[in-house]
Image: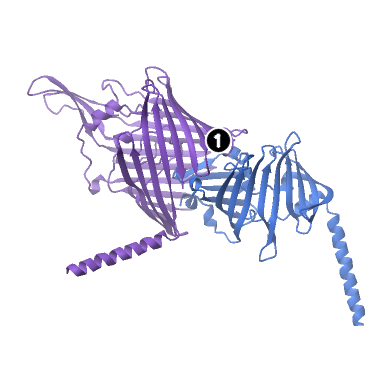
């Protein structure tokens, strides 16, 4: 009797798991992009100690140490980047506040040599951030792909020894610089592993690779190495995450902290 | 008695040194070393061979405060002079809603780029190329209260520090400066009535940063009066210059924000200098004429910047200078009327890659159609060391920037 009951439970579990797997496999591109986990070390709320390495086409490197503070309550995305090295940019702080309701980003840059903050024009969100391959927009938080792109699922592939969904993303707004983005999503964790960005001419323009995934205390995976390559110019920016903390004080996202 | 005094001194030194050691632990120490070589093309001579250096120590105490100390030195190889000075030395305490900073410090206000009519606390000269200059640090106490969407800053400067005439700027009239250097001009008395103070209110409104400020202090440089009198011994007419430091009140307004793809800013000040007494004080005095402005005037800057898709950064500012020249604050002809200065400044920069960048700074005097142009190429030898070559060229005739020699500057800078 007991065995029969156990067998029934196992059978039910098997059926349920099968149904879940089936449901997972039947996901559309839009459903996958909706389920993308955004709790990467550079998104969500918390703070992180990073190394930012920029490399030119000859392989020359420039390394920056920085601390990144982030807060995201779903309506307002705040971010403060504070440079700790090298010496020529030490103490430089960059504050950005994105208001989702107004779809506006306000940005201020504090330069120690100037001794006060400066407003940064919104246009610079499209420009290179401190000479890196990331745009101001990208460093201020990865764009909301479900809002900005229409996703079509392609055949699954394996990438970095992980089973991946492959998505073809077409921008839904003229504000997006790319004509198409191809995204590889780790099926098990619903996390992007690779993004290929194509320019208006259809050329591969940039490639973003996320690797060195580590689990936090709640079992969530985050990439600790983020590499953006500019495929046209041969340059590369590597973000190595040294430490992450889940707590962040709201006082970091103020003019007061910017000036201190 | 003598022994106890020695013990006291040694104990104090030990305590002080242990505090210094504790302070240094966890502190950031850095600095820079710059070697500049200037060549005057017109006179075919080396015009500058200067070694500048600075070293600083900064110790932060998280959200509680910080201590900052820096030294600056300069060696001029042409006249073999060396000067070293305490640059900044201050302590900051961050209280619940108030940040307090006390010590020798540079306080920078305003929203414009490089030329700030509302930034009057620290003595500051004019520089074409150093747009990040904060002015000469002075002893001051500063407190800022942070409210919900506003901040109020109060500054007290106990002792007035004038601008050294040698710091007036490389474009100033050197002959005039030499004349002024020969004058004996007493400084204001070091008492409470001579203190300087300033307040600033800042807020954020409809996407714009707004600042309103008021400064009550002294002009950085002495006001000059040309006096024509009869020499009582020879009974011949005699012309001489008189100088005095005088009070000034400055009401300032500044705004910065974003308009479309452009960063925009405007900054203006209404300057009320103490009126100079131009009445002859004796029958032998024939006339007195002011070489400095003797009526209230306006200084204003309005500007915008934009970064193009190809990475070129462009900035432009229109400058209205109610007291005349931007580079020389005195009239050379005392009978001439003070005409406001109108200028256009531009800054273009482009980084080819992480090692090479090009910059062009220009300042055009719109009234006399002369201009100063400073193109600069910078090459990063390593992450910490850069080599810069720049040219200062002047175009136009019979104006503020005409007749100045073309200079080439080579600069090697290491930051650590």
Residue B294, picture quadrant = top left
Location of mark 1 (residue): B356
x then y, percent, for residue B14:
31, 65
**For the view shown, which residue lies furthest in the left direction?**
B233
Chain of the residue under the numbered disc 1 shown in the image: B
Residue A241, picture quadrant = bottom right
Determine if residue A14 is in view.
yes
Front-most of residues A183 and B4 = B4
Split into 4 quadrants, where in the image is the N terminus of chain B?
Answer: bottom left
Tell me which colouring the rendered structure shows.
Answer: by chain
> Would you say A63 lies left or right of B291 here?
right
On screen, residue A250 above or below B180: below
**For the view shown, which residue lies furthest in the bottom direction?**
A1
Residue B366, picture quadrant = top left
Chain given the colour blue: A
User: Of helix, strand and loop, which one carries label 1?
Assistant: strand
Determine if residue B275 is in view.
no
Residue drawn 52% across the image and 50% down it: A85
> Would you say A7 lies left or right of B416 here?
right
x then y, percent, for residue B391:
45, 27
On screen, residue B22 above or below B229: below
> Would you say B12 lies left or right of A225 here?
left
Structural crowding at the residue carrying mark 1, measured as other residues with C-alpha within 10 Å and reported as few (<14), some (14–19) or many (≥20): some
Front-most of residues B325 and A242 = A242
> Would you say A173 lies left or right of B380 here?
right
Chain given the colour purple: B
């Amino acid at each position: 009797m007991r065995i029969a009951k156990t067998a029934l439970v196992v059978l039910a579990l098997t059926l349920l798991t099968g149904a879940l797997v089936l449901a997972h496999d039947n996901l559309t591109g839009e459903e996958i992009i909706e389920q993308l986990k955004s709790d990467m070390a550079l998104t969500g709320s918390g703070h992180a100690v990073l190394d930012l390495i920029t490399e030119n086409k000859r392989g020359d490197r420039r390394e920056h140490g920085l601390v990144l503070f982030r807060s995201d309550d779903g309506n307002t995305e705040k971010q403060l980047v504070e440079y700790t090295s090298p010496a020529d940019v030490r103490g430089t702080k960059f504050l950005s506040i994105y208001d989702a309701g107004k779809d506006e980003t306000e940005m201020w840059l504090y330069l120690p040599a100037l001794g006060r903050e400066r407003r940064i024009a919104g246009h610079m969100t499209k420009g290179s951030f401190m000479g890196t391959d990331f745009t101001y927009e990208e460093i201020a938080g990865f764009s909301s792909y479900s809002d900005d792109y229409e996703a079509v699922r392609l055949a699954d592939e394996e990438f970095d020894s992980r089973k991946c969904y492959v998505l073809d993303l077409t921008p839904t707004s003229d504000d997006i610089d790319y004509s198409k983005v191809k995204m590889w999503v780790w099926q098990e964790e619903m996390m992007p592993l690779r993004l290929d960005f194509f320019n208006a001419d259809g050329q591969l323009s940039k490639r973003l690779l996320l690797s060195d995934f580590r689990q936090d205390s709640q079992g969530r995976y985050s990439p600790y190495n983020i590499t953006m390559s500019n495929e046209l110019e041969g340059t590369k920016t590597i973000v190595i995450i040294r430490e992450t903390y889940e707590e962040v004080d709201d006082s970091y996202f103020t003019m007061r902290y910017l000036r201190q | 008695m003598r022994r106890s005094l020695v013990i006291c001194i040694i104990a104090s030194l030990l305590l002080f040194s242990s505090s210094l050691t504790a302070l240094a632990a966890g502190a950031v120490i850095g600095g820079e070393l710059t070697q500049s070589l200037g060549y005057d093309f017109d006179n075919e001579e080396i015009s500058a061979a200067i070694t500048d250096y600075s070293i600083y120590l900064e110790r932060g105490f998280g959200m509680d405060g910080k201590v900052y100390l820096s030294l600056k030195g300069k060696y001029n190889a042409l006249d073999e002079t060396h000067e070293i000075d305490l640059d900044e030395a201050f302590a900051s305490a961050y209280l619940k809603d108030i940040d307090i900073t006390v010590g020798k410090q540079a306080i920078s206000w305003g929203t414009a780029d490089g030329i700030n009519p509302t930034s009057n606390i620290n003595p500051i000269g004019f520089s074409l190329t150093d747009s990040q200059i904060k002015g000469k640090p002075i002893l001051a106490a500063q407190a800022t209260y942070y409210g919900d969407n506003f901040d109020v800053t109060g500054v007290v400067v106990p002792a007035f520090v004038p601008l050294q005439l040698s710091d007036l700027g490389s474009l100033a009239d050197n002959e005039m400066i030499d004349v002024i250097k020969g004058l004996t001009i007493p400084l204001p008395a070091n008492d409470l009535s001579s203190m300087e103070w300033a307040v600033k209110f800042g807020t954020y409104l409809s996407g714009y940063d707004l600042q309103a400020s008021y400064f009550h202090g002294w002009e950085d440089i002495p006001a000059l009066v040309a006096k024509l009198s009869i020499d009582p011994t020879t009974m011949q007419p005699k012309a001489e210059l008189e100088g005095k430091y005088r009070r000034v009140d400055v009401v300032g307004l500044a705004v910065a924000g974003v308009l479309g793809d452009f960063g925009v800013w405007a900054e203006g000040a209404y300057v009320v200098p103490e009126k100079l007494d131009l009445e002859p004080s004796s029958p032998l005095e024939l006339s007195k004429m002011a070489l400095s402005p003797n009526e209230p005037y306006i200084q204003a800057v309005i500007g915008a910047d934009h970064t193009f898709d190809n990475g070129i950064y462009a900035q432009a500012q229109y400058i209205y200078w109610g007291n005349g020249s931007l580079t020389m604050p005195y009239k050379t002809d005392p009978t001439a009327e003070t005409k406001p200065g109108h200028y256009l400044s531009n800054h273009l920069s482009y980084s080819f890659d992480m090692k090479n960048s090009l910059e062009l700074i220009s300042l055009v005097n719109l009234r006399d159609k002369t201009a100063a142009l400073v193109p600069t190429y910078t090459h990063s030898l390593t992450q910490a060391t850069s080599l810069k070559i720049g040219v200062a060229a002047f175009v136009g005739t019979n104006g503020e920037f005409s007749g100045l020699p073309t200079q080439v500057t080579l600069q090697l800078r290491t930051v650590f």
